[in-house]
Amino acid sequence: MLTLILLLFGPATLAENGPGDSGASESETKAPVANLGDAMKAQQALTEIIHAYESGNTLLIQGRIDPSMIGYQRFLDGMIQDMNLMKQINVHLFDTQTTVGPDVAVIQTGWEKRFLSSANFAPGIFSGRTTFLLHRDGNSWKIASMVGDNPFSGQSGTLGQLTVSPLSISASCSVLGCPNINITLDDPDLSGLATTTVEILTSKGGDREIVTMTATTPGHLTGSIGTIVGPGQPVTQLNNRVEMSSLPPMPATITIRYYDQNPGNNRPPSYVVRTINVS
Amino acid sequence: MRDAMLIARRLFWLCAIFFSIAAFSVPAHSEPPRLTDNGSVLLAFQQAAGGELPAIVEQKEGGTKIEWHGGATVDYYQNSSSGGTLLTPVISGNFERTEIRSDVRATSQNGSFSYLQLSATNSNDFAAQRNPNLVNMVQAGYTSSTLQLKAGDVPVNFSTLGTQNSFRGLFGQVQMAETSLAASIGYIAPTWNDIASADSRTQYLRNAGSAKLERSVFGTGRIFATYQFYSDNSSSMPFGQSFLAAASSQVETIGFAYQAGSLGLTSEFGIGNWKEEDQESKVDNAYVLDATWQGNQYGLRAGYHSIGTYFSSLSSQAMPGVEESYLGGNWQALSWLALQADLRSSENRLAIITGSSSTNGILLTQLLKFDEKLPGLSLTLTENMSYGQDPSGGKNGNDTYGANIGYVTGPWNSTLSYNRTSVTSDADSTSDSKTDAWMVNLGRSLNSPTAAGWSANIGVNGSYQNQSIGTGNNISSQWGLNFNGTIIDWIILNGVYSEGTLTPATGSGAMNNRNYSLEASHPFRNQNIFKVYVRNTANFSGNSALANEASTVGTQVVLVF
């Protein structure tokens, strides 16, 4: 309440607005819109940064980032780590949209990053969506921030993508043999990590299992676990097998979840979840 | 061989068409200007451009101004690729891409300003565009001395901790003496298509809104307060299709910005309440403080940022879990010597085992210019060190130092640079590496001896990199040639060729690569352009699983009006 009173009735002068983090106020003293050609220049600036990343030119990228960007050091460390672990990096953009104002530009784009692992030259691919905020610095554009999945730096956060198969299991599968659950996890934040774990929970019977996922290329991990669903099947936790009774009530679900410590998009640590139907 | 002949034949016909158009097109400046009335001009324009024209409404004083700019870019191209989508994004086939742009502005005599901007693309190339019809940007607005309204794609930049994002919705701002009030509401979605249809959504539609109240104080200072919220619409995605649970957040911040001569100071504090569906809400806070001082010969900057692990706002800058401080500066010590230093200390509460939970970094740069004795010669020395600790207490770090020599004399320019990078990590010692990299560039610019003629730039470049990692060395070498030239009002040429080799530490076969691209553009009728282009990227490898190639041959027409 006190803040509101100060804002509405506090001391004021006729001086012009000062600089600071309120780009909206600064931009209102100039022409409120930019030309469409400025969008091309902003996109070109982003393309140059991408090419510098692909060629390992960290100094150029440092020069194009605002030194006051929050997470600057984390971003640099992650970028250098990525360049160490990956060769022949190629970043492909799609669905790119650019909105330009007098002093700021917003580029929203999807991306795919292809690379070869430095350790075993196995190919890998990550994908995501990012919104880049650029601000004008003289005649050039600098990156002020990125939100969404970060294509340049695994440590700055990208949402892990969990893929499971099969998506459904028959409740009578014990007759011919129940399938294994195959799990694939793609999370660039895990680049350099040899293993991680995902948790499996059943909606019925209370089974809980931990699956160890093993990396085949940076940030790409796979794992599997057997299942058994049958009438009156007893359940034992942490025995490396998902167990569920097929007796009513049915249908039920098997939930596979991964705790993404850094899911990107400025989101706190969150569970990434996939479910398998059992009916 | 057969593919190469096919490409060469297509290129021949494209060039034939191109030069035919170039030979018979009307040079931009050959027609003398004609003087006539507005109506005749508008009629001629309508015949040339088609469609309806904006009306020119003259006020009594004749001060109304209508501007309409637009353009269209049409591409037809043929791709051929091999190797699969894991190795190349290019898809084989015949494709088209059409982009239209329109910018209509009306400025009235009292200074108010209205506009409508639109850019949209149609393409059948799935690699470039997942949705065949994509609205790149649409924005309509009205601005007067005290009021601003926007609708469509609205970038909102309220504050570092509050809102820095792009809305698809509405924005309004009113200025009342020294106080301004701004607000925005809408969706945050990757594309307009995601709002229109659930079929293309890969994440929840996010409803969002924000407001800012700001006032000028104490000369050049400002104080402000912001409020923002977002809420994921859990019914906007089919059950089980989203990786994450729907979430919501409310954040309030207060802050100030102050500029007095060379000193600039900004600070902001925020409190947020974040909640995932079916989970308890979490409250957290954030604080930032940044200061700059810019003198004639030197500048200083310092700051402190602390963002709570569960602080989630609409600001693209507010990264959860970061606590950091930095001190840096630049100094033109002498006419021939410039220095720059940057010190940082940061904590990352979201670090995983191979990341750094705490890091100290330092960047030092020296730039020397030898203008008096050797004009055009410069030497840049850099040292970039970062040492950290992962969550389990293991050490990690990276250290890069390098030197870059540049020399420019007359039409010649050249650079030679060397970098040494060391990366270590207790959590992943198999990836510890030392990398030596050399790069060289040599370029020359050429100009015709007459005032209006031609110009060109030619360059060669080379690089060599040796990465010692694990039990072996990854060695790569690359060389290239680039060219661009212009004959005014007739042709613009751009060409690049490079090839190289990558020898892996695994001992498997070396990978050779070859890349080239050639573009030829002909301007006609003012800013319009007709272009033909060919591009090729190929990787040949002793390992057939890694071989891939992608080629593109196409034409492009750019119309500007």
Image (cartoon, coloured by chain):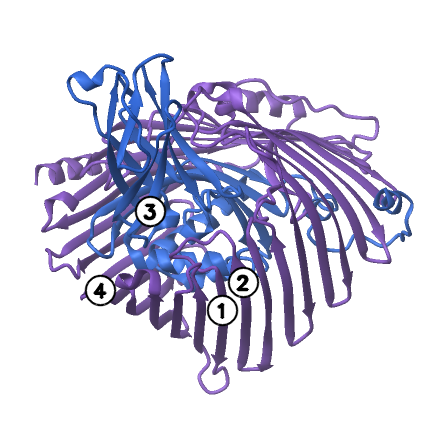
Which one of the lettered chains is coloured blue?
A
Read off the residue under disc 4. B470
Q: Nearer the viewer, residue B359 or A89?
A: B359
Q: Secondary structure at mark 4?
A: loop
Discs 3 and 4 share one subunit: no
Q: Chain of mark 1?
A: B
Is residue B465 toward the left or the right of residue B224 in the image?
A: left
Read off the residue under disc 1. B361
Q: Nearer the viewer, mark 1 or mark 2?
A: 2
Is residue A278 toward the left or the right of residue B256 in the image?
A: left
Q: Secondary structure at mark 1?
A: strand
Q: CA distance from mark 4 to mark 1?
A: 25 Å
Discs 3 and 2 share one subunit: no
Read off the residue under disc 3. A196
Residue B207 vs B159, above or below: the answer is above
Percent position of residue A177, x then y:
17, 22
Q: CA distance from mark 3 to mark 4?
A: 22 Å
Do callouts 4 and 2 mark residues in contact (Cβ within 8 Å)?
no
Do callouts 1 and 2 mark residues in contact (Cβ within 8 Å)?
yes
Q: Chain of mark 2?
A: B
Q: Nearer the viewer, residue B455 or A52?
A: A52
Give the numbered dot on residue B97: none
Read off the residue under disc 2. B346
Q: Secondary structure at mark 2?
A: strand
